[in-house]
Amino acid sequence: MSGIVVVGAGQAGLALVAKLRAEGYSGALTLLGEEAWPPYQRPPLSKKFLLGELARERLYLRSRDFYAEHDIDLRLGARVEAIDRSAKNISFGGSVLAYEKLVLTTGAVPRRLPTAIGGDLGNVFTLRGIDDVDAMAPLFVPGARLLVVGGGYIGLEAAAIAARSGLEVTLIESAPRILGRVAAEETADYFRALHRENGVDLREGTGLRRLLGDTIVEAAELADGAMVHVDLVIVGIGVQPATALAEKAGLRVENGIATDPFGRTTDLSIFAAGDCASFPYAGGRLRLESVQNAIEHAECVAKNLMGAEMPYRPVPWFWSDQYEVKLQIAGLNTGHDRVVVREGDREGSVSHWYFAGRRFIAIDAMNDPRAYMTGRRLLGAGASPDPDNLAEADLKTLTAA
């Protein structure tokens, strides 16, 4: 029996196979991953794992015994080269595996610097997997000079852990400000001040011209002509969905592998979920990059593989830890034209509420979990607080509304 084959052993892949078994699926179930490691959590990579405060096994989402106990055929180091849709099989490492249903949970891959500007020099890293951190960790020592390229959340989180570890950190962002694509100016102002207070040399509107060195990076020439001497570079310029396998198979790709509301691709025997997949949302298509989406989207697809026909309708939420600040985000701020700033109940807590007209669409909460939970409940209910009175309103009143 060919059963269900899942390509991509990350958060989404594991969530999907675990949910299938929990929902009573008893057929053959195979999970293939390119890395040598069983499915693991990625957020701690740039924090406790990088600092040596978390053992590798503590990263694993499930013990190795889980897969055998649930009759899941986990195959690691398996890079799938092709999908034969007519024969309904996949090929990898000289092997061919048939499927009844195929699910792509291939995730996303980090964008890298071009080799023409020194992106292939030694000690230039992206921060996506265990192998990246293993290579970087020996250089992560007090006094080392780190250049972070990119002022999104990946870059800012890397800068925060480096600064706390005693590295000399320079962060450059080619756009006019950090968090330009994902947050309002108010949120960018908050985190800019936070990083500078912690000693980060943060330069906005400053791109990278080239990295210099024979085999190992030694310096960076910035777009404004400035030279920065460095021992290592972390590239945090975003990720792109891993769609090469789907494209090669002739599946439709539109900001990720295009799926319908139930997770089906243009081939009804092939589904997709997580970072690699886009789905219908608010009259367009949406692709989310978050742990929450990886789990919830995969579990929804698992139910649909069991015949549920349940459309995926998420209320997006995210988080970021930087220094002693926990940023919690709910909703999507795309299209906002107003931001209301609300001071929290304790010192240093604040929340930024996004509105499109008078419709509440998203919240950024810094060390303010009560505001975050209130905002998330309102978004889930499709309710909007009055933006004119929000700054002074009682949160309990907003919840009741």
Image: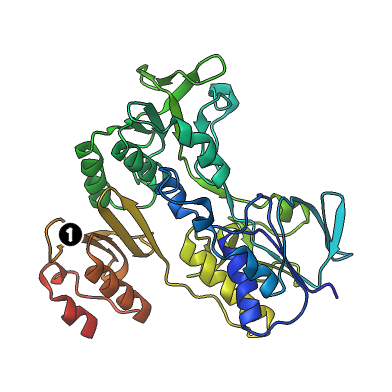
- Where is residue 35? Give x, y as percent: 65, 49
Most extreme residue toward the right, as rendered? 87
* Quadrant in which residue 86 is drawn: bottom right
- Colour approach in the figure: rainbow
Between 319 and 23, which is closer to the camera in this rendering? 23
Circle 1: element type: loop
* Quadrant in which residue 308 is drawn: bottom right
**On screen, 237 above or below 354?**
above
Residue ID at (49%, 54%): 42
Q: Mark 1 = which residue?
A: 349
Task: Give the quarter of the figure containing the N terminus.
Answer: bottom right
Residue ID at (28%, 67%): 357
Between 79 and 352, which is closer to the camera in this rendering? 79
**On screen, 361 above or below 166?**
below
Amino acid type of the residue tagged 1 in the rendering: Ser
Most extreme residue toward the top, as rendered? 214
